[in-house]
Amino acid sequence: MPNTPPPLTLSDYAKKLVGQRSSADGLSLGQLKTEVLSGLTVALALVPEAVAFAFVAGVDPLVGLYAAFMVGLVTALFGGRPGMISGATGALAVVMVALVADHGVQYLFATVVLMGILQLLAGVFRLGKFIRMVPHPVMLGFVNGLAIVIFLAQMEQFKVGEEGAKVWMSGPTLWLTLGLVIGTMAIIWVTPKVTKAIPAPLAAIGIVAALVIFMDLPVPRVGDLASLKGGLPSFAIPDVPFTFETLKIIFPYALILAAIGLIESLLTLNLVGTMTGKTGGASKESLAQGAANVVTGFFGGMGGCAMIGQSMINVKSGGRTRISGTMAALFLLAFILFASALIELIPLAALVGVMFMVVIGTFAWQSFKVLKRVPRSDALVILLVTAVTVAEDLAVAVIVGVIVSALVYSWNAASRIHATARPSESEAGARVYEIEGPLFFGSAGSFIELFNPENDPETVILDFMGSRVVDHSALQAIEAVAAKYQAAGKRLQLRHLTPDCHRLLSTAGQLMIDTDDDPHYRVAVDYDIKTGRLGSEH
């Protein structure tokens, strides 16, 4: 009989599961410890953010904490980029203010459910792939603007007093708080040089918190924001009328929230992927964000999306897998259920110091050098997106940046259209115009102005070998040039056009189209000039 291996003990099974080197995901025991500690660090940093954003939206702090837990858990398990952290965010909270003020928190829950459904649809139809169209200057502006927004958000922690009547710190309290913030940042900077056994932000929070607690220093603490104690979130269908009037109220908010959430999440996906050297799935992230918000809406949360600050904390603390994000969500729930009294003792200065280090690490400092080297238009886009991110929100800034970048590209591309005239080698007395540059809506007018039939011979050849006919505006421009030569009683011949261009230019029956060596790219839009109707793509 063959030798049968001895049964595995629980210890052996655990080692085999996470192993010194697992063949499934390369996770070692050391990395597992790092993932868990990274999750704990992120959970601590999530608490004041979730509470603060709940206040911004005008809802109970537990609504923000439940959102951070549920959105964080679902996206950590199923999102497109392991290592990303999601939760309640300020970009979404500012949109919710008017809805909560005018209609109440139940309408917010209904809106979050609809927001999630819209994001699910975006994932199903793979709309997330359009994030690839965001140019690099827009990404630089987004990162810089977000770093400034994170920095400005921490300024609220330097205020004391009741909500709505807060004043800036002064005197010994201010100086002591600043000292603790600087001390936290120094510990984060020094810790990796001493040991990598524990994430630097977690070490800093632990040391500063212990100092404040044992010395009973008079500085603001997490408990001064709100009580964290609560129970498990419970399922409930939003208490709103299921009518068309309700849909009219919540749909505009849901659409805006879905767009902001996806843009911020997908840009964070790209940024984390750049830092970790791994790409993520945009459609998968859209589906995860949608599912997370549907669940959150039914369990009394305010919804959320990816959080770049906490994602940076996780990545820099060593979090690379889904374990860190999952543990962050579970630790946050444990804080709410069991450890609220302990977490409330943590000084806000320690968490502010951590976020300041995130700001330093997030801001693209090399962009100052880039501004001097890149074209002025790209420099303008970087500065514009940074400014709009700070003044408005991330989604508006990215949309503005993409539009400006597209207009600049169109302008530059339009200026490249030109024609070089030479005698024809195949037809005596004919003149050949070699067209260079893309022919599209932006360059169509300049293309038409290139030709003057009165000064041309009886036969003219337009050679499009060096050009590209992009859209139906280009086709109309070719038709306009053909009409000019027809009116002058002269013969126009077109070379190196695609087969679909041949068909779409059927109105000019007098045109002699040379099909030898024609390219085979597709015109972007099938437009029948004869009928003036759009058709299907080829």
Image (spheres, rainbow, N blue to C red):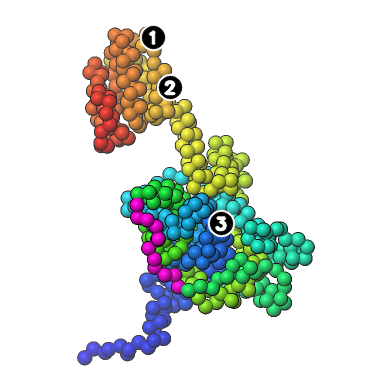
Q: Nearer the viewer, residue 222 or 430?
A: 222
**Mark 2 or 3, closer to the camera:** 3
Q: Which residue is mark 1?
A: 455
Tell me: residue 129, above or below residue 29: above
Residue 479, image x and y in percent? 31, 20
Start-end of magenta stretch: 232-243
Q: Which residue is mark 2?
A: 446
Q: Amino acid at mark 1?
A: Asn
Who's the residue at 60% across and 72% down the image? 344
Residue 457, image x and y in percent? 33, 10
Total labels drawn = 3
Q: Nearer the viewer, residue 361 or 417?
A: 361
Q: CA distance from mark 2 to mark 1?
A: 18 Å
The label on residue 336 is none
Q: Nearer the viewer, residue 439 or 126?
A: 126
Residue 341, image x and y in percent? 59, 76
